[in-house]
Image: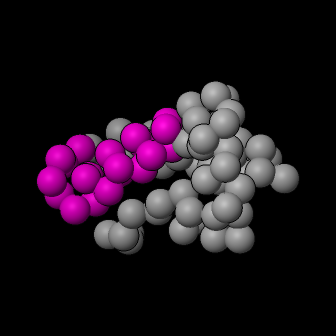
Amino acid sequence: MSHVPHELVEEFPADKDKIHALTQTDGHFIKLADDYQKVNREIHMIETKIHPADDGYEKQLRRQRLALKDQISIYLK
């Protein structure tokens, strides 16, 4: 378990400029990125014990983050 947030530009460093451009112009991408950030931050809060949660909920959030990351990855290609 990592206590480092998985920020979007850290997950896709080669696409940093593309991510920035899309978050300025593309409504669908903005929604995906926003959803990813919300879920990611919630996971980070659980990992650092700021907002404890049960394992099932944390696993659900991790699956949701992975699904969003997959959608973003496809979008960036």
Left or right of 11 in this view: 42: left
Q: Visible in this render: residue 56?
A: no
Q: Residue furthest right?
A: 77
Colour scheme of this structure image?
one colour
Q: Visible in this render: residue 52?
A: yes
Q: Quadrant of the N terminus?
A: bottom left
Q: Is residue 38 magenta?
A: yes
Pinpoint residue 32: horizontal percent, then vertical percent: 59, 36
Tell me the residue at 54%/57% (across/down): 8
| Residue 63, placed above or below residue 15 | above
The stretch of residues the image draws in magenta is: 34-53
Tell me the residue at 64%/64% (across/down): 16
| Residue 52, placed above or below residue 26 | below
Tell me the residue at 47%/62% (across/down): 6
The secondary structure that dominates the magenta segment is helix
Tell me the residue at 67%/44% (across/down): 22
Q: Specify the quadrant of the image occupied by residue 4.
A: bottom left
Q: Specify the quadrant of the image occupied by residue 60.
A: top left
Looking at this view, is 3 or 76 the one in front?
A: 76
Pinpoint residue 77: horizontal percent, then vertical percent: 84, 53
| Residue 64, placed above or below residue 21 | above
Q: Residue furthest left?
A: 50
Q: Is residue 51 magenta?
A: yes
Looking at this view, is 30 or 4 the one in front?
A: 30
Left or right of 53 in this view: 43: right
Left or right of 19 in this view: 50: left
Pinpoint residue 48: horizontal percent, then vertical percent: 22, 62
